[in-house]
Amino acid sequence: NAGVTQTPKFQVLKTGQSMTLQCAQDMNHEYMSWYRQDPGMGLRLIHYSVGAGITDQGEVPNGYNVSRSTTEDFPLRLLSAAPSQTSVYFCATGLEASQNYGYTFGSGTRLTVV
Amino acid sequence: AQSVTQPDIHITVSEGASLELRCNYSYGATPYLFWYVQSPGQGLQLLLKYFSGDTLVQGIKGFEAEFKRSQSSFNLRKPSVHWSDAAEYFCAVGDTGNQFYFGTGTSLTVIP
């Protein structure tokens, strides 16, 4: 049972490049979400999904796209990377959005945009 | 809008000493409250949560937290800190919706 798997663990991008951060879970969780963590800012919600085919914006969605074609996967796309997107990105999943059972976090992707 | 404040950016305690990490929230109704811990290079792990009922909740690793509505607080406590407790701690608040808000975190250093 792998839980929540994020790939890659580290990535360096040049400004303007695109990339996709992967998040996969094998816990049959309906809820999946992406957070970014910045020093002094805590974790901020980027996008979330309450089930396959359903996505919605969080607190800081600009510059990011998501899709949820399967229950297991929730990729985060950066279409044109900017230095302001340098951050640590976490995928969090749960049986449901309300955290009745807590969220499970991946180990993070550290992204640097130069 | 909901918000969470963790007033202490960094705390240092001696091993064996007691610990209290502060968390204040802003929310109109009774919130869902959480404490998470993050070890270096790792994701967040849920320590405990409060939804309703008994205002003193027990969590994993010997942690507890007390919900005080009058003070809009949900402070995390541990009677005796171990060196392995050194980590970053996050308080979070949410409701029955789909969004949760995290505090900026408190970094805990434990000295021998």
Image (cartoon, grey):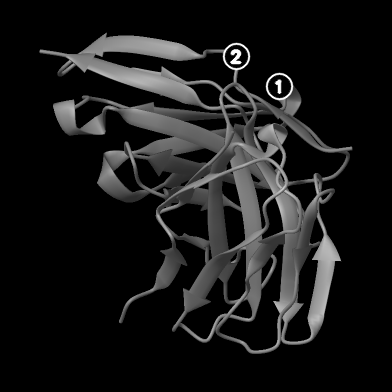
**Residue A97 seen in the current view:** yes
Callout 1: SS: helix
Observer-nearest residue: B9 or B78? B9
At horizontal 81% and vertical 46% (from top left) the residue drawn is: A59
Q: Disc 1 sits on a residue from what chain?
A: B
The residue identified by callout 1 is: B71
Q: Quadrant of residue A57?
A: bottom right
| Location of residue B103 (image quadrant) | top right
Task: Looking at this view, name the residue that lies furthest to the left.
Answer: B112
Task: Say which residue appears at 40% left-offset and 40% top-offset.
Answer: B37
Q: Amino acid at mark 2?
A: Pro
Please name the amino acid that badge 1 sits on.
Gln
Are there few (<14), some (14-19), or many (20+) residues within 10 Å of tag 1?
A: few
For discs 1 and 2, the disc positioned in front in the rendered view = 2
Left or right of A49: which side holds A108? Answer: left
**Residue A83 at x, y percent in the picture:** 67, 33
- Asked if residue A47 is positioned above or below residue B69 in the image, the reply reads below
- Is the C terminus of chain A in the top left, top right, bottom left or bottom right quadrant? top right
If the image is split into quadrants, where does the N terminus of chain A sit? bottom left
Q: Is residue B13 left or right of residue A70?
A: left
Could you say which is closer to the camera, residue A112 or residue B10? A112
Of residues A26 and B33, which is closer to you in this image?
A26
Which comes sooner in the sequence, label 1 or label 2?
Answer: 2
Chain of the residue where label 2 is placed in the rendered structure: B
Q: Which residue is mark 2?
A: B7
State whether discs 1 and 2 lie on one chain: yes
Residue B77 spot, x, y in % from top left: 39, 28
Say which residue appears at 59% left-offset and 26% top-offset: B23
